[in-house]
Image (spheres, rainbow, N blue to C red):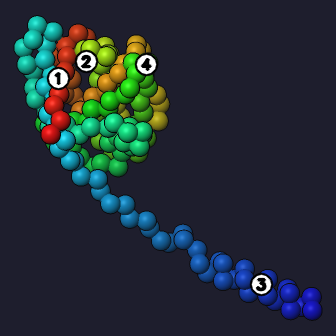
């Protein structure tokens, strides 16, 4: 009886080993940009800087996922994270393949801080330093190109 049990255990172990996932690759579907509205960045004096096509991150899942797993984003696109309360925020670049500028805004939609040129796949926290209720992510280098400053603001409309 012990021989039968040992042979049965050996057979199960061999079948389990033969079913290894080491050589199998999981293919993920690329997430495409979906325009959900438009966002305009304006100087503190009211002059418009640029208008972007925008995707919104409003649910917990959308905010947690953000721009992860995207391989590109056009220069006229961005993602706006909307939170229910104003609070110090911290973002990171885990599973984010494109460099970004992270722009933190207060409850009045005014820029309160930046994290420019956030590097792909970096898991270090990138804090707002002050309370923020909105966070705008755009391609790295655009905050400098647009000469954004603390006190500049956004307006947006949903499609």
Q: What is the quadrant of residue 88 in the picture?
A: top left
Mark 1–mark 2 Cα distance, whole angstroms, equals 7 Å
User: Which label number is shown at residue 155?
Assistant: 1
In the shown orientation, is residue 35 left or right of residue 92?
left
The residue beneath circle 4 is 87
Q: Are marks 4 and 2 in contact (CB under 8 Å)?
A: no
Question: Disc 1 on helix, strand or loop?
Answer: strand
- Res 120 visible: no
Residue at figure coordinates x 32%, y 16% from the top left: 106
Disc 3 crowd rating (10 Å Cα; few below 14, some 14-19, many 20+) is: few
Residue at figure coordinates x 32%, y 60% from the top left: 29
Disc 4 crowd rating (10 Å Cα; few below 14, some 14-19, many 20+) is: some
The earlier-in-sequence mark between 1 and 2 is: 2
Give the foreground label among 2 and 3. 2
Q: What is the quadrant of residue 66 in the picture?
A: top left
Mark 4–mark 2 Cα distance, whole angstroms, equals 13 Å
User: Which label number is shown at residue 10?
Assistant: 3
Q: What is the quadrant of residue 74 in the picture?
A: top left
The residue beneath circle 2 is 109
Give whichever of 82, 96 is nearer the camera: 82
The earlier-in-sequence mark between 3 and 1 is: 3
The earlier-in-sequence mark between 2 and 3 is: 3
Residue at figure coordinates x 15%, y 9% from the top left: 44
Give above or below for 154 relative to 97: above
């Amino acid at each position: 009886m012990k021989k039968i049990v040992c042979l049965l255990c050996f057979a199960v172990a061999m079948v389990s080993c033969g079913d290894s996932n080491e050589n199998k690759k999981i293919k993920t579907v690329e997430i495409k940009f979906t325009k959900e509205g438009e966002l305009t960045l304006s100087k503190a004096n009211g002059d418009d800087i640029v208008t972007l096509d925008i995707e919104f991150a409003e649910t917990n899942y959308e905010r947690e996922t953000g721009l992860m797993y995207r391989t590109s984003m056009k220069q006229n696109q961005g993602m706006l994270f909307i939170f229910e309360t104003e609070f110090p925020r911290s973002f990171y670049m885990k599973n984010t393949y494109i460099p970004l500028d992270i722009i933190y805004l207060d409850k009045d939609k005014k820029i309160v801080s930046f994290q420019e040129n956030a590097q792909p796949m970096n898991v270090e926290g990138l804090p707002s330093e002050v309370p923020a209720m909105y966070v705008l992510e755009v391609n790295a280098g655009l905050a400098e190109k647009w000469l954004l400053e603390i006190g500049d603001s956004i307006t947006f409309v949903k499609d």
